[in-house]
Image: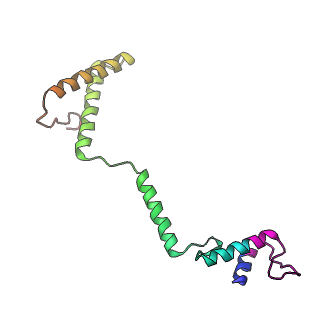
Amino acid sequence: MRSAFEAWAQRDGHIVRRREDKPEEYLVFETQRRWVIWQAALEHGKTPGGRKTAAQKEAAAAEKRAAESLQRPPSINSDEAAVRNQVLNEVLDAFSSLGGERGMDDILKVVQGLKKKQAEQADTPVTAKIPDRHNA
């Protein structure tokens, strides 16, 4: 156990000389401190030196996959896609009918027109699917 620690410590750049009056202790305090930590890790079943067991590697990979899945944008269903496409088509139609030369006035007219149209549609139930006018 001590030889494995000393090999690791030397690779990490620590001095592994021991005290002459107490050969069980290392001359440099930091090396002694790491030796104590190494022993405690072994006692508690952890692997020393930052190496991971297969179970720890699998747990880290599962955690990484879970984090990646949270970062992906949620997929939309076909109904939501149809609504978004319909709204986009209405906005494009509204701007193309105005000519699009006056800037903010055109934008305000489009927004007000869409709000009015939405209020009218909310009053009447929709029974048929509205066809896509631009991609037909």
Q: Whole-percent x and y of residue 25?
A: 80, 78
Q: In the image, is 14 to the left or to the right of 51?
A: right
- Residue 11 appears anywhere in the view: no
Instruction: Tell me the chief SS of the magenta region.
Output: loop
Q: Residue at x 22, y 26 (%)?
A: 118
Residue 117 highlighted magenta (yes or no): no
Residue 12 highlighted magenta (yes or no): yes
Q: Residue at x 69, y 72 (%)?
A: 37
Q: Whole-percent x and y of residue 69?
A: 41, 55
The stretch in magenta equals 9-33
**The C terminus lies in quadrant:** top left
Q: Residue at x 47, y 62 (%)?
A: 63
To which quarter of the image does residue 83 belong?
top left
Q: In the image, is 60 to the left or to the right of 125?
A: right
Q: Whole-percent x and y of residue 132?
A: 20, 36
Residue 106 vertical position relative to residue 135 in the rendered view, above or below: above
**Is residue 127 or residue 51 the one in the foreground?**
51
**Is residue 52 or residue 98 the one in the foreground?**
52
**The N terminus lies in quadrant:** bottom right
